[in-house]
Image (cartoon, rainbow, N blue to C red):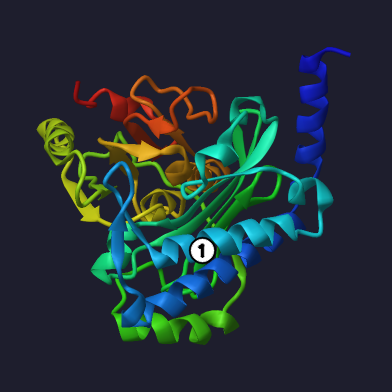
Amino acid sequence: MSANNLQKIAEASVRDSVTRDALAAVMAVAEDAGRAIMAIYSDSARWAVTEKSDSSPITAADIAAHESIVKGLQALADKTLASLPVLSEESSPKDLQGRRDWPAYWLVDPLDGTKEFIARNGEFSVNIALVVGHEAVLGVVYGPANGVSYVAAEGVGSFRVGPEAVIETTAVAEAISSVSANKAASAWMPIQARAPNWSASNGKLNLTVSRRHGLERLAHFEQSLQAVGWPVNSIPAGSAFKICAVAEGRAHAYPRFGPTSEWDTAAAQVVLEQAGGELVDAKGQRFLYNCRSTLLNGDFLAVAKASEPWLKHWPS
């Protein structure tokens, strides 16, 4: 049997394990990591920040969450899922050797929004995705500061799990207390992305945007939309919650100009796609994973289908 056929068999075996029970189990792993993060969030003696080789910040919370997630994924009841390798933002180079040959793996950002964690604004998340072949097929985005999860999987759907309130900036004391207070509200609420009515004459476009990256090109994008009669309301936010805001229908689009990595987008992409949206590059091509030597993403657009009307205004 050829290597290609063996890989397809391995991929099919993993896809068979993608169920609602598996999704719930991965959400529990993310919640455990969130508790590790919040233990450090509440202890000022552990707030030290250092720099990685690329000058990005790292904290004790990043490391604690990474270790918790790796341990949790390896302990999953489904042995097929438990045996998969983990590609995390905090993985060592040795852990990633041979990654291009993996038929399936976990793609993890243990603490997405480290700068938001440092800023103490509550807008950070735990992101865990399952990638099969080059497609993200299961995703969990969990907010430790308020106990909200966005979860999705192929054939299962896309849901918000936790409090009825949407993600909002949370003061430190409120963030810590809300984790336990929100445990009672755990219903799985289906979510749906919502496209604007492009034929309306008096509509408004709601964007969720980055606070720090690509602001000049973002301004050009907004101005282009406004020039053809569309008022734009832009709301800055942190981490993968920007993509989840589109999935939930609270924003029409999230245009991203500037660097991200594959672990920043994969989990939220599943949430968005299963809610009827899409995450595409500047040419309208769907994001795929583990296809290149680099793990860096280019610019992207997260929208409810379809992306074409938006990309007409994409700055060069």
Residue 190 seen from this side: no
Between 146 and 157, the residue placed more toward the observer is: 146
Q: Is residue 106 left or right of residue 75?
A: left
Q: From this viewpoint, which residue is outermost toward the right?
A: 1
Q: Is residue 99 left or right of residue 283?
A: right
Between 289 and 44, the residue placed more toward the observer is: 44
Residue in the picture at 76% in, 46% down: 83
Between 184 and 50, the residue placed more toward the observer is: 50
Q: Amino acid at mark 1?
A: Ala
Residue 154 pos. (x, y %): 67, 42
Residue in the picture at 38% in, 27% down: 281
User: Against 104, is 194 above or below?
Assistant: below
Residue 238 pos. (x, y %): 31, 57
Residue 147 pos. (x, y %): 49, 73
Q: Which residue is mark 1?
A: 65
Q: Quadrant of the N terminus?
A: top right
For the image shown, how many numbered marks are present on the structure? 1
Residue 35 pos. (x, y %): 52, 75
Q: Secondary structure at mark 1?
A: helix
Between 29 and 221, the residue placed more toward the observer is: 29
Residue in the picture at 16% in, 33% down: 217
Q: From this viewpoint, which residue is outermost toward the front?
A: 94
User: Against 150, is 281 above or below?
Assistant: above
Residue 24 seen from this side: yes
Q: Residues within 10 Å of mark 1 (few under 14, many from 20)?
A: many
